[in-house]
Image: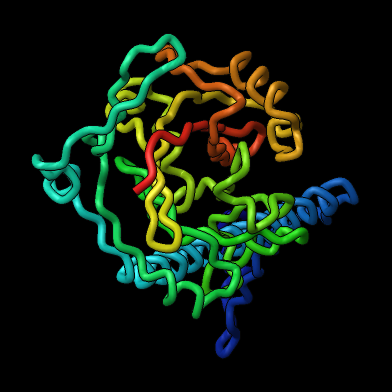
Amino acid sequence: MSNIEEKKRAVKKRPGQETVHKKKKKKELPPLTAGKKFKECIRSIIFCASLGTFAFAATGLLVIFAGYYTSQREYSDINDKVVIGTEETGKEETQPQTEPAETETDENGEIKIIETQPAGHYIPIQVDDEYYRAVNSDYAMYIYVPGTEVQYPVVAGRPDGHYLRYTFKGTENMAGAIFIDHRIPREDYLNTFNIIICGHNRKDGTMFSGLVSYMDESFRDNNPYIYLIKDGKEYVYEVFAFYELEPVSKIYNPATDPDTYMSIINEHNTYKKKTDVTTSDRIISLYTCNDDSSMRYLIHAVLREEY
């Protein structure tokens, strides 16, 4: 018998004996080094921070849109107390053909005809002043800017900037209200050289955001009039200036003397339409922020007619 056969017999399994299989050892991962542990920790922190930022942003957007909805609904309800006609109905109601024009003699002895009828841009606007005063004792007047969404009650401003964050009805909302500079005495609103009226530029198109349309000169040409209504009287103002200016200027101070005020307007005005406006006129100044609040949009209009 060969040596090979003897070796084979020697390794033959005995009765009842089980073959023992050696288990393969699993490869063990090398332990994380301090550097790798640090990187894993940073990744976890970044992930959690990103998740938190997303949740915070989503919550912020919900709050913003809820604020938009609340302010839009409130001011929509308020405007039910206002009836705005058209230029055509205004002509019919205010231009009777039988009424003669008045005349006067000027300093040179020449006879001049005084315009006693509307110039054709009168819009009959009925405002329930008593309702607005009952809702808010700070109610001062109503403003209407054709071609925009600007149709709001205007309130007397307060030194603490209250109406930057509270609506006309007193609801806390970043839409705020349209308000007159608090430094102008209430009794002087329509008798002073300049009424400064402010409002937010809202991304949903409300409040004074519509004033941005005046950047377009063709829009200014087609919508040249702004209307104020107070105690049953209507005041028609013609736009004569529009420009963008930094937030710090004498232009925002109603105490600035008329000569200086007009000088600043003429220096920055981008509106090419020439309109004769002097310091003896009465004007209104509307302003709001630009999109990133770094600058201000300003519109100036001069009083042309009262009804």
- The answer to whether residue 146 is visible is yes
The residue that appears at 63% across and 39% down in the rendered structure is 293
Residue 280 or residue 184, whichever sits in front: 280
Say which quadrant the N terminus sits in.
bottom right
In the rendered image, which quarter is residue 116 located in?
top left
Specify the farthest residue to the top: 108
Q: Position of residue 115 (x, y in %)?
A: 28, 31
Residue 148 or residue 232, whichever sits in front: 232
The residue that appears at 56% across and 32% down in the rendered structure is 298
Specify the farthest residue to the bottom: 16
The residue that appears at 31% across and 29% down in the rendered structure is 114
The residue that appears at 31% across and 19% down in the rendered structure is 112
Does 232 appear above or below 218?
below
Specify the farthest residue to the front: 109
**41 to the left or right of 240:** right
- The answer to whether residue 291 is visible is no
Residue 26 or residue 41, whichever sits in front: 41
In the rendered image, which quarter is residue 185 located in?
bottom right
Q: Position of residue 266 (x, y in %)?
A: 59, 16
In the rendered image, which quarter is residue 60 located in?
bottom right
Does 141 appear above or below 33?
below
